[in-house]
Image (tube, rainbow, N blue to C red):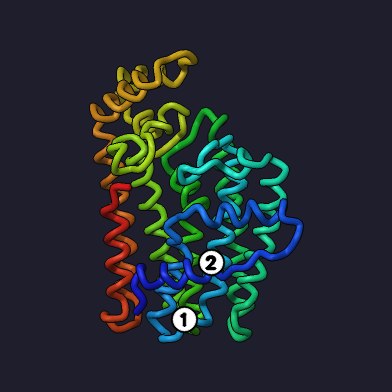
Amino acid sequence: MLSYKESLGIIEKKLEEFSLSRQPSGLYEPIRYILSIGGKRIRPCLTLMSHSIFSDDPENAIAPALGLEVFHNFTLMHDDIMDNAEKRRNFETVHVKWNNNTAILSGDAMLIMAYQLIAKAHPPVLSEILNLYNQTALEVCEGQQYDMDFETRKQVSVEDYLEMIRLKTAVLLAASLSAGAILAEASRENSRLLYQVGQSLGIGFQLQDDYLDVFAEDEAFGKAIGNDILSNKKTYLMLSALQSGNTGLVKRLESWIAKKDFDPAEKIKSVQEIYRELNIGEKTLEISREYFNRGLQYLQQLAAPEGKKVELIEFARFLASRSF
């Protein structure tokens, strides 16, 4: 089975060969830029890793895996516009480096290119792969809409939030793993189990990210912490705190949420203290671990030799223990 490192090497090499020689350069240069500024390439690597459980030849999976990576970066390009984000992976976002119109149009082109790559799946499984991709692309859009709706909705439950991150984040990881099995013409049950693996890992991953944004060390996390606090983002931590039933601490938190003028460092420290008093950080890590463990349980059920699953199991454990 391919390791994450081996899969990453294949994906990075293919991305370097991914020639964008078409014109006009104003459309394609932003695409080259966003694909060149890094990223963990988790989604295409998962496709290659799951494919290698059932096949020793990765060739059939490479183009669709690249398509998933191009699609993922398309969503980032458009998300950055909606979020007014200035940085992506410590580089200027496309709409800042160029402008909004360029970022929208180049993003649209990326979506088409993702379809072109995914459509290179070999004919016996093409229909199934396209159906999976179409369902996933729509669900990602649904998740993004929910995320935007939550900004103005007064009442958002923890359950609402978990469903939003399932759609916005987890289904693409799920589709990436499931696609590997489909491309290798594995059984429907194995494809279904891998989908559940990815969905569980994706939710655990996002909950972990919520925690790290509040409590990670800057050096380990690779970016400033506390952005979710400063923007009053309705994360698992905030929603759990608001629904904790501790009237005094809830009022303190609501007071910070309502403040328009504040010292950023003071707000981050004060909200961190509220979360600590409510033990919200540990609760977030606990449910994150539950989802990671659920993903590992699904992986154990996979009808494949244990030796073929070991790299994917190790990578799932690595994700569960990350501090970045």
Q: Residues within 10 Å of mark 2 (few under 14, many from 20)?
A: few
Closest to the observer, 16 or 5 = 16
Task: Name the side, left or right, on which 87 lies relative to 284.
Answer: right
Task: Name the side, left or right, on which 25 lies relative to 290.
Answer: right
Tally of numbered discs: 2
Labels 1 and 2: the sequence-earlier one: 2
Q: Residues within 10 Å of mark 1 (few under 14, many from 20)?
A: many
Look at the picture and state if 182 lies above or below 87: below
Mark 1 or 2, closer to the camera: 2
Q: Position of residue 114 (x, y in %)?
A: 63, 65
Q: Give me the residue at 36% from left, 18% from top.
A: 251
Q: Position of residue 39 (x, y in %)?
A: 45, 55
Closest to the observer, 77 or 186 = 77
How far apart marks 1 and 2 lie (CA) works out to 18 Å
**Regarding mark 1 in the picture, which secondary structure is present there?**
loop
Marker disc for residue 16: 2
Look at the picture and state if 152 lies above or below 298: above
The residue type indicated by label 1 comes to Pro
Q: Give me the residue at 52% from left, 71% from top.
A: 14
Q: Which residue is mark 1?
A: 58
Marker disc for residue 304: none
Look at the picture and state if 4 lies above or below 138: below
Q: Position of residue 213 (x, y in %)?
A: 36, 38
